[in-house]
Amino acid sequence: MPRSSHALVAALAVALPSAASAASPQSFKGEYTVSFLGLSIARSTFSSHYENGAYAINGSVSAAGLAKLFDDTRGTISSKGTISGQKMVPQAFRADYTSGKKASSIDIRFANGNVTSTQVIPAPGKRDPKAWVPIGTGDLASVLDPMAATVIHADSLDQVCGRKVKFYDGEMRADLTLTYASKGTISVPGYKGDTVTCRMGFEPVAGYRKGRKALDYLRNKSRMMVTFAPLGQTGVYAPIHATVGTQIGTLTISARRFEAVQ
C-alpha cells in the first residue's frame, strides 16, 4: 500500500482517547478493530497519559485475521506534545513498523506546532516534478500529526463537527473537514452514552502524486463517516467508530474498548 494512503487509514485506525485539558493526571485506554468487507484485518491498542498540560501516547498496531496471510504488518506509534487552550500542540511523532522483513519508520519533530524536521526510512524515491505536488512554504505550519489529528476539543457534542483539521503524515499534507451528520448513542466496554457522527471530507494539499486514483476517490467519491464520543468531563471527543469507502469496499474501524482509567 502506498505510504500516503496507508497513513490516512492509520490516522483513522489509531483513533484513540488522546488528550485531557485538566492539569491533574489522567489516563485513557483504547482498543480498536479494523475490518474490511466484514473481515478483521487489523487491531490496535493504545495507552495515553496527561499531566500538567502535557500528553504522551503509545500504541501498537498489527495485522489480524486473513490479512496476516498476505501482509503481516505490525508496528508501534508514539506521540507527545502540550495542550494549549482547546488546541493540541504536537512536539514529536514516531511510527516504526515492519512488513515481513522490511522495516520502515517515520519521525516528525515540531516547534510551536510547526514541523521542523521529517525523517522517513527508507527514504522516498526520486519524484517526477511534472507529476508531483511538492510541499511549499507555509504548508507545514500549525499542523497535526496522525495521532493528534484524531481527537477534537469542543464545549459540547454540538460543536464537534463543523471544522477543518490540517494533517501531516510525514509525506502528504491534507485537510480533513468535518460536517454534522447525526446524533446517537453507543455502548462498548468502558463507555455507554451519547455520540455525534460527522461526515469527513478529504482534500490533499501537497506531498502527493497527481492523478492517483486512490486519492481522487477519497476526495471526490468516498463516503467517510466518523462517530465521536466524549472522554469523561475533559472536553475531548475521540472517534469510537468510523467507516471509509474505498474503490473496492468499505473499511470499518470500531472500538472494542473506550475508557478512562482512574
Image: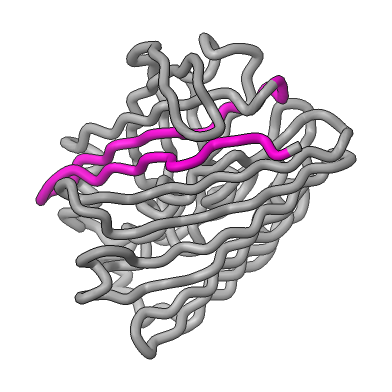
Residue at the image position 62 percent from the left and 19 percent from the top: 154
Q: Is 81 situated left or right of 119 in this image? A: right
Residue at the image position 49 percent from the left and 71 percent from the top: 75
Q: Is 175 situated left or right of 41 in this image? A: right
With respect to residue 215, does 92 lie above or below?
below
Residue at the image position 66 percent from the left and 41 percent from the top: 28
Q: Is residue 208 visible?
A: yes
Q: Which of these two is toward me, 254 or 132? A: 254
Q: Which of these two is toward me, 18 or 167? A: 18
Q: Which residues are magenta?
A: 233-261
Q: Quadrant of the C terminus?
A: top right
The chief SS type of the magenta part is: strand
With respect to residue 67, does 31 lie above or below?
above
With respect to residue 133, does 2 lie above or below?
below
Q: Is 245 included in the stretch rendered in magenta?
A: yes
With respect to residue 129, does 183 lie above or below?
above
Q: Position of residue 158 (x, y in %)?
A: 52, 9
Q: Is 72 included in the stretch rendered in magenta?
A: no
Q: Quadrant of the N terminus?
A: bottom left
Q: Is residue 166 visible?
A: no
Q: Which of these two is toward me, 173 or 81? A: 81
Q: Which of these two is toward me, 27 or 50? A: 27
